[in-house]
Amino acid sequence: MKIYTKTGDAGETGLFGGPRVRKDHARIEAFGTVDELNSHLGLIRTLPGTGVIDELLRQIQCDLFELGAQLATPGDALERISLSHVETLEKAIDRHEELLPSLSSFILPTGTPLAAAVHVARTVCRRAERRVVKLASMPDTAIPVNAIEYLNRLGDLLFVLARYANRQERVADDPWQPSRK
């Protein structure tokens, strides 16, 4: 089977079991950004220091494939991302956050290369969440029931994991200093 089909050369693509839509359609933007996030997590998994969080990131990548498939399938009634997926993220947040000092200010998205890469993934996750919210606001458009909640919690987890990555390397959070004009 060839990788190219030439069916998208006019700026349209087919949805799973659905119609052809423009490549800038809100549904394509939503699952495309979820795919982008998944690729960032794949890159993170290649970086030194991911050992203890690698299996968690791998499972999240699998979940994101499920979510992307569901977003790409109009009217998909299968619950691929359930409330238990959200609860798994919450447990991971709690488990890692208890190992971190509490925050008293905003922090800059920096630190070790691993932490900085996780912060980038966090921002892509927040963009994916915004894309799914936009898709949900379109008339006659259904989205997976737990999609927004899952992405919201995943963004929280990635924030905690970035801090955790810094903590593992004994790099302190870099607090934001408001400018004084």
Image (cartoon, grey):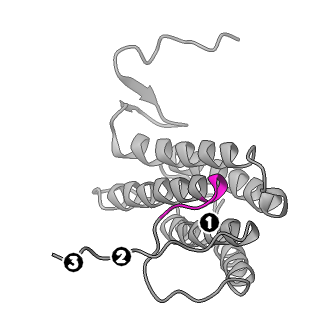
Residue bearing mark 1: 162
Q: Residue at x 78, y 56 (%)?
A: 49
Q: Based on the displayed image, in which of its 4 quarters is residue 11 positioned?
A: top left
Amino acid carrying mark 3 in the image:
Arg
> Badge 1: how crowded within 10 Å, few (<14), some, or many (20+)?
many
Circle 1 or circle 3, nearest the eye: 3
The image quarter in which residue 57 lies: bottom right
- Compared across the picture, whether 91 is left or right of 118 comes to right
| First in residue order: circle 1 vs circle 2 | 1
Is 79 contained in the magenta span? no
Q: Pointer 1 and pointer 3: residues touching (CB < 8 Å)?
A: no
Callout 2 crowding tier (Cα within 10 Å): few <14, some 14–19, many ≥20: few
Q: In which quadrant of the rendered image does the N terminus lie?
A: top right
Q: Amino acid at mark 2?
A: Gln
Question: Distance from label 3 to label 2 (Cα)?
Answer: 9 Å
Per the image, the residue denoted by label 2 is: 177
Q: Which residues are magenta?
A: 109-115
- Badge 3 crowding class, 10 Å Cα cut-off, few under 14, some 14 to 19, many 20 or more, is few
